[in-house]
Image (cartoon, rainbow, N blue to C red):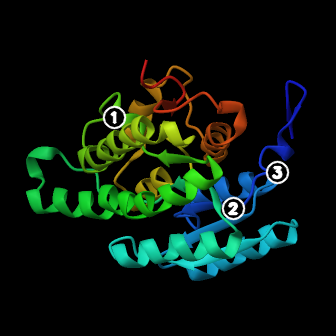
Amino acid sequence: MTEHGTDLTSDFADRAGTAFVVGGSGGLGAAICRELAVRGSDVALTYRGNEEAAQLLAADISEWGRRAWAVGLDLTDHGAAKASVDAIAEAAGGIHTLVYAAGPTVPQRHLSTVDPGEVRWQLDADAAGFFAVAQPAIVHLRETEGSIVAVTTAATRRFPVRDGLSSIPKAAVEAAIRGIAAEEGRFGVRANTVGPGMLTDGMAQRLMASGDLDERALDVARANIPMRRFGVAADIAEAVCFLASARARFITGQHLDVDGGFTL
């Protein structure tokens, strides 16, 4: 793959260690894993319940000539999160990129109907889950002068009604990323976020299938997007790989919305 004469397949070919993709068995995570592998990176990916999908993806990556690991991980088990990060760093000879692409499916609810306990659960599952892998990864990223890219949401810039259970914990992840960027830049570590808009795959696809987003809601969503269409997981993978690569070597603490102009 080339872009303006640049050979993107060599983006990570000379990087020591591996990319570690948390949530790599999901729709967005799988697209990111594939793109990282195409661009020359070994890939470790985590799954929570879908071991078969994770193993099949790891097998595909191995067939492309890259090393691959599939790791079962429940992010609410913070000790297991640290152990998984350390084990992959040892097995791969380091971690050059941590990608956080996990997160539970979130119901679309007005905040007036949400119990505080539900918010706490989402914060534990998503924001604390992110920190459970990011904090132990920092020491390894210092060794490789690597980076963290967290996939959050465009909803932290323009709030879609009924999306609070998703955007509240994602805003916490973005705040943590800015903190890591500010504190770890002196060690050569970068940290950025990518904010997906409406996609035809990933969580939006699951919400459509569940009926949380009906045709009327989808029409309203399209009308709020200047490009009048939804994106795909590959759009997010492109942004993640750019921010993780040396082409973004002077970019840190930033948020890139990939949303067709929704946040304008």
> Residue 121: image x %, image y %?
21, 64
Please tell me which residue lies in front, 193 or 132.
132
User: Where does label 1 land, which residue?
Assistant: 156
Please tell me which residue lies in front, 88 or 6.
88
Quick one: label 1, few (<14), some, or many (20+) residues within 10 Å?
many
From the viewer's perspective, tell me whether residue 103 is left or right of residue 86.
left
Asked where in the image residue 78 lies, by quadrant, the reply is bottom left
Callout 3: SS: loop
User: Where does label 2 land, which residue?
Assistant: 18
Quick one: label 3, few (<14), some, or many (20+) residues within 10 Å?
few
> Residue 50: image x %, image y %?
54, 78
Asked where in the image residue 79 lies, by quadrant, the reply is bottom left
> Residue 48: image x %, image y %?
47, 76
Query: Which mark is first along the chain, 1 or 3?
Result: 3
Q: Marks 2 and 3, Cα distance to the nearest angstrom?
A: 11 Å
* Residue located at (73% from left, 57% from top): 34
Callout 2: SS: strand
Q: Amino acid at mark 1?
A: Thr
Q: Establish if 217 lies above or below 22.
A: above
Q: Amino acid at mark 2?
A: Thr
Q: Are marks 2 and 1 in contact (CB under 8 Å)?
A: no
User: Where does label 3 land, which residue?
Assistant: 14
Query: Which mark is first along the chain, 1 or 2?
Result: 2
Quarter of the image with the N terminus is top right
Quick one: label 2, few (<14), some, or many (20+) residues within 10 Å?
many
